[in-house]
Image: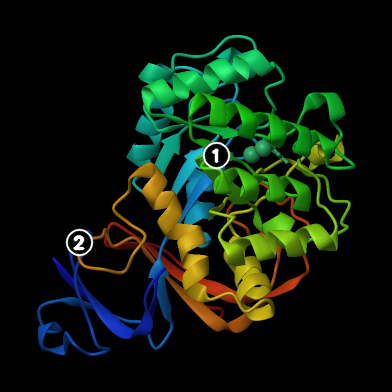
Amino acid sequence: MLTVIKNARLVDSEIDRQGSLLLQDERIIATGSIDAFSALEAEAAVIDAQGQTLMPAFVDLHAHFRDPGLTYKEDLLTGAQAALAGGYTAVNLMANTKPVCDTSEKQAAVMQRAAALDLIDIYQAQAITVNMQGEELTDFSSSLTPLLSDDGKGIADDKLMYKALEQAAANGKILQLHEENPEFAPDITGLAEETMVARDLTLAAAAKAPVYLCHISTAKALKMVEIAKQNGVQVICEVTPHHLALADNPYKVHPPLRSAADCQALIEGIRKGTVDIIGTDHAPHSEADKAAGAPGLVGLETAFSVLYTVLVEENKISLSKLSQLLSLRGAEILNLEQGRVLPGYKANLTLVDLTVSRTIKPEKFHSKSHNTPFAGRTYRGEILWTMHNGKIKWRKETDK
Ligand code: DOR
Ligand code: ZN
Ligand code: ZN
């Protein structure tokens, strides 16, 4: 089946121009000027982008869907719907489910149920340690996906972390590390993050292992990442929308929201290329759990608007750079054929309206949970639809 998407502003990590796309089934097969494929319109399905901005769909390497075991907060279906509404077609799920996802059998069970939904691509990470207890490594060689993580918890034992990095290097895996040293938690001063980042960069260099550092949030931790990169350490540095956008805010999340100077340092890190990727750390919680102190926020449905406003509008970072951080890098790490608007890539795309402002209303979320510090705030940019493998899987309801 042929599909023409015409009259778009095409934006990816390199491209920013008016144009149109020709799709065959699930793939982009040609790009051209805004009406390049008008001769094919009689035989193709035609989608008129009406001048709106068409980007590769986003990839989130850091989300919590709570399935199995904590599905009163989120499940695979509502998580996938939230992802689509946020412009995402691929997510990598953290292992802090109930039970903890610490074997390839548990990964397979989640991914089989996820595939049956036929909505987005769902990757389930395997835990680094058995039951995320920080005592015994899981079997890295059998992990079905490239990333392993105990996210939610820092791994306290230095020698175990070193062994984990050696195992990761030997098996071609990447550890996604939650950088909070439990000895310093709660992390008011940043020491929990900074002591653990210092240790893990040191160990990664020694083990010659790549590392993915989750939610870097302080200027000092970022500086250490910058120096490590200069020294040849293979480090992938993640930041979240909330750590970029919210300063001096008491909303409970791990790591905590930092100072305005820290936010600015992270933004500067994006400009300089120290930051590689944006993960949402989508962390849904019920109202009762939140009231009892659960850390985290629902991230997938607000990420693009927050990032477009803070990075592109307020800090003049290009939309192409944002596309690189939201789509291309994650696709490269997971080896997905998406992340560019070029022939040969999967038609995993999202159409965004950059002219409208939107006030965040958690009661409108597709997620089962509504915990967000962004409620009531107004941001620019809205997702109009999201396409997965050539099919529009979610479309904004037009209010009439
Ligand atoms: O705030 C957070 N919530 N940080 C994490 O690392 C874990 C997450 C969760 O699972 O709720
Ligand atoms: Zn974390
Ligand atoms: Zn997380």
Name which residue lies at 43% across and 69% down.
385
x then y, percent, for residue 245: 73, 63
Residue identified by numbered label 2: 344
Nearest the viewer among 332 and 45 is: 332
Nearest the viewer among 15 and 81 is: 15
Q: Which residue lies furthest to the front in this view?
A: 231
Question: Does 234 sit left or right of 15 as displayed?
Answer: right
> Label 1 sits on what residue type?
Tyr
Rendering quarter of residue 19 = bottom left
x then y, percent, for residue 236: 53, 45
Question: Does 99 sit left or right of 41 as displayed?
Answer: right
Q: Is mark 2 on a helix, strand or loop?
A: loop
> Label 2 sits on what residue type?
Gly
Q: How crowded is mark 2: few (under 14 residues within 10 Å), some or many (20 or more)?
A: some
Q: Residue furthest top?
A: 136
x then y, percent, for residue 197: 69, 36
Q: Please, is residue 213 above or below residue 153 in the view?
A: below
Q: Is mark 1 on a helix, strand or loop?
A: strand
Does any atom of ligand 3 lie closer than 8 Å to the CB of label 2? no
Name which residue lies at 81% across and 38% down.
288
- Residue 73 visible in the shown view: no
Question: Does 115 sit left or right of 246 as displayed?
Answer: left
Nearest the viewer among 165 and 335 is: 165
x then y, percent, for residue 185: 85, 31
Q: Residue 212 carries which label?
A: 1
Of pointers 2 and 1, the one earlier in the residue sequence: 1
| Cα separation between marks 2 and 1 | 28 Å
Q: Residues within 10 Å of mark 1 (few under 14, many from 20)?
A: many
- Residue 199 visible in the shown view: yes
Name which residue lies at 86% across and 40% down.
291
